[in-house]
Image (spheres, rainbow, N blue to C red):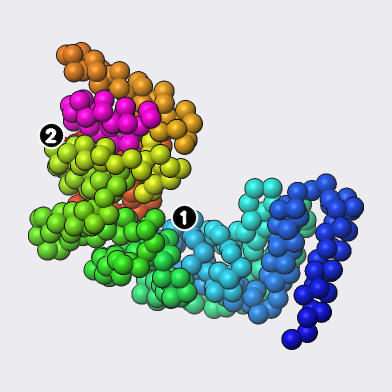
Amino acid sequence: MNKGIPVTISVIVAGALVLFAISPFGRIPLSVFLSVLQIRRIEHRMQQKSVYVPVANTLALYCQSDSNLFPNTMGYMWFPKEVQEMGGEDGMVSSNAAFLIFGGGFYHYGYVLTLNEQRSDAITNVWDLLLRREGSADLHLYTLSIPKTNALSADSLPQQVLAGYDERIKHDPTDLQAYQGRIRLLLRFGKIADARASCKTMLGKLTDEDAWWSYLVNALVMDEERSAGAGEAFLLDWVRQQPSFFSYLDLAYYYQLQKQPKQAVAAMLKAMDYNDCNGPTGHGCNAECRGYTAAMYAHQCGEDAVVVKLCDKLLGVTINGDYAKPGLRTLKSAAEKSQQGERVQVSWDERILPFDAFQDFDIEKLLGRPVDRPHRDTGQFHPGL
């Protein structure tokens, strides 16, 4: 082995850092400087024919297809693998234009596909693909002519997108967002059985931090597919193997969605036996977000003794500062007054996010029934007492 190589590399890196420090860029934080270099690298790749031609073809087909097939904002898996590899984030499609957006914050850039109406005719559409960069003139990359009849069907489109999710999962079997995206896509196209089957594929593959979601959603599906109580037994078994403040609140949330408030409150009481809540994150969000949502539900169920205990537990959480403390104190005070016969209605504290395990996820379509979830504006759960 040539031992001089590491030394040479070190000298080059050190020299580059010295030049960076004495240059005008030296006044820019290193992280920003490196971010700019990454953006420039991506912009260079976006101008390669091997990348922009597949993008133009895909976006043109999307524009010429039924608009009802597409969500308002499309994630990365809706686009060619060349874009997925670069980190394309969001896209939008209409009948005469499409956008594929990169970046964010201080700088935006991406592809824009527009219909060239002057060059199009009754048979053929002509599309122009541009590279758009904030603060710069658009750069024309490609012109594409395709028959107006070329379009994707409701059967072919999901397969194309599913292939992207499958590749992502193959690369990283622990990627919860990829599994959720796959299930969300199947639900969008009415493939309920396939969506439920995809739920099962997550079990045993996710990290400890994300596994809770797979057990929760599968428990709910089991109750629909097998029998009432099958999901409960499944989830109880997992919770008893992984007992914690958060896993028992997962169980309480399950009972909440199943319209079983007494069981939900009992699970909340069990959660208070564990002291792992003083951390920055938990199952879906931090302890105060999870606990406050549970306590509001318990208050609306009239279980105010439990509300007081849960609020006291959460008031002892210090890792996240005081952001949730005013809301917890207000809720505790209302619960104490209710215990004395003075019923007090509590509005949701806007500083505390409500916990919703299925935000932006059509859980009702997956289960085939209505599901009660917290409404931040009203703080009402409709617990079905």
Q: Is residue 286 left or right of residue 203?
A: right
Q: Which residue is mark 1?
A: 72
Q: Position of residue 221 (x, y in %)?
A: 21, 60
Q: Is residue 104 left or right of residue 22?
A: left
Residue 49 appears in the figure: yes
Along the viewing direction, whichever of 177 and 130 lies nearer the viewer: 177
Residue shown at the point (21%, 18%) measured from the top left: 338
Along the viewing direction, whichever of 23 and 376 lies nearer the viewer: 23
Q: Which residue is mark 2?
A: 385
In the picture as drawn, the residue positioned furthest to the bottom comes out as: 1
In the rendered image, which quarter contains the N terminus? bottom right
Magenta stretch, residue numbers: 290-316
Q: Check the image and report above or below for 27 versus 368.
A: above
Q: Check the image and report above or below for 28 versus 210.
A: above
Residue shown at the point (64%, 75%) measured from the top left: 51
Q: Check the image and report above or below for 337 versus 302.
A: above
In the rendered image, which quarter contains the C terminus? top left
Q: Is residue 3 left or right of residue 272?
A: right
Let me know if residue 293 is in the magenta part: yes
Residue shown at the point (26%, 37%) measured from the top left: 272
Let me know if residue 90 is in the magenta part: no
Q: Position of residue 220 (x, y in %)?
A: 21, 56
- For marks 1 and 2, the one nearer the N-term is 1
Residue shown at the point (42%, 29%) measured from the top left: 324
| Amino acid type assigned to the residue bearing label 1 in the image | Asn
How would you rate the neighbour count of disc 2 (Cα within 10 Å): few for under 14, some for 14-19, many for 20 or more? few
Residue 198 appears in the figure: no
